[in-house]
Every structure is written in structure tokens, then in C-alpha cells.
Image (tube, helix red, strand yellow):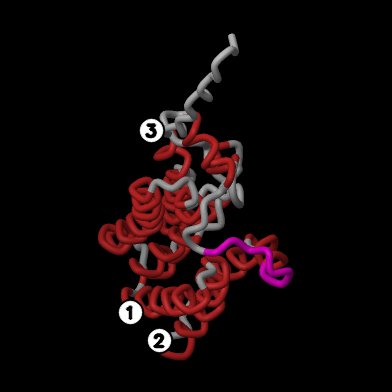
Amino acid sequence: MSAAGWGWTLLAMLAGYLIGSLSFAVIVSRTMGLADPRSYGSGNPGATNVLRSGNKAAAILTLVFDALKGFVPVLAVLVWGPRYGLGTTAAAFVGLAAFVGHLWPVFFRFQGGKGVATAAGVLMALNPWLGAATLLTWLIIAAFFRYSSLASLVAAVFAPFYQALIWDADPALLAIALMSLLLVWRHEANIKKLLAGTESRLGSKAPAAQAHAAAHGAPRAHHPHPTKKKGQH
């Protein structure tokens, strides 16, 4: 790659990192008047933890936008990058930069999530079949065991092997492997909870989120005053 190509690659990676730094779990939750997802449940600003607030729409929006911020930068490089000397390898590392932005977002004091949806978006843009295979792996494990973290870990481990064994072991594999390693590392606390049997299952609400919902318009149970007996004042 020429010096100009390296320059464009670094610029594209910076743009990818900044896009990845948009923490949509926090943005969507604030917009919809929900508790900050970093304040309840696992403390992870991601779709699974937002789901623990009880608001499915917020969780779906978070999932979609977190995936898009991995998908869009990679797709942009694949479509417009060739005219600047950028190819699949550059696109993969731009995706890695977006993933890193989700983990350590500059706009949110570097307090990010685990990057599952963003990594899925990166894989879908790089190779739709690889993304679909990884997503199917996640769905199978999640359906059988009801643990989002376990499904994410298994999918993360399998993704680079799918790429190497089914498709080409090209330089893009390095970016995919790095994403997988970082994703597993970010799940360290979840691994400990899984081993201890204390990990939350999919769909379980977090106490703090329930308390927030109660404090913001959830109906309270009506307790009628006891009827006074004759002679009492």
C-alpha cells in the first residue's frame, strides 16, 4: 500500500472510531426517559441490558443502531474505498476501529459496552455469509441456554474459525480475530457469573430499572384505608 493509501486508511479508521463512540444504549435511553443502562443490571450499555429496563422498543433501537455503526463504516470503505486504494483489509480494520470505539467511546468517558451488536454489523458488511453464520450461532446458543453472554462468547470464538476454514485466511482475518479476543475479554465478569451460576438470563428485569419505572409513572397499588369501627375517632 502506498503512503497515500496508509493515510486514507488511518483517516477512515479515525472516522470509524468516532462513529463507534456513539453509545446508542445511553442515547436511546435518555431520549425515551429511561434509566441510564450503566446504572442497573450488568452496567453494560448494550441492547441486552436495555431490555432489562422492560422497554423492548428501546432495546431493539439500541441493537439496530449499534449494529449499523459497525456496518456503515465498513460498507462505506468497500463502496468508495477502491478509488483511494482501500480494499477489504482496510475495511476490516475500519470495522475494528468502530468496534473499539464502542468499547471505549470518546464521547462517553471511555465507558462503553461489550460490542456484540457492533461486531455483528462489521461481519455482516465484510461478508454477509460470515455474519449470518455467526448470528445463527448466537441464536442457537441463546435459544437453548437463555444466556446472552454465553451466546456472544461462543459466537465470538467461532467467527474467526468460520472465516479461516470456510473463506480465505486473508489479512482481514487478523481484524476479526482481534475483535473476537476483545469481545471475550470484555465478558470476563460474565464468564465468572456463568461459572458461579449467578448470570442473568435473557428477559430478566433489573431491580434498579424496575425502581426507575415505578418512579416515572408506573401505577401504584391502591391500599384503601381501614374502615373505622364504631366508637373510634
- Residue at the spot 44% in from the left edge and 60% down from the top edge: 117
Residue at horizontal 35 percent and vertical 69 percent from the top: 124
Q: Are marks 2 and 1 in contact (CB under 8 Å)?
A: yes
Quadrant of residue 100 in the image? bottom right
Q: How many angstroms separate mark 3 from mark 2 (CA)?
A: 41 Å
Residue 70 among magenta residues = no
Could you say where residue 67 lies in the image, as x and y percent from the top left? 38, 57
Q: Please tell me whether mark 3 sits on a helix, a strand or a loop.
A: helix
Query: Does dot 1 land on a helix, a strand or a loop?
Result: helix
Residue located beneath label 3 in the image:
31
Residue 187: which quarter of the image?
bottom right
Look at the image and tell me whether residue 95 can be seen. Answer: no
Q: Residues within 10 Å of mark 2 (few under 14, many from 20)?
A: some
Q: Earlier in the sequence, mark 2 or mark 1?
A: 1
The mark found on residue 167 in the picture is 2
Task: Give 87 or 39, whichever is nearer the viewer.
Answer: 39
Q: Is residue 19 visible?
A: yes
Element under label 2?
Answer: loop
Extent of the magenta region: 194-201
- Dot 3 amino acid type: Thr
- For residue 198: magenta? yes
Q: Which residue position holds label 1?
A: 129
Q: Residues within 10 Å of mark 1 (few under 14, many from 20)?
A: some
Residue drawn at point x = 54 percent, y = 64 percent: 201
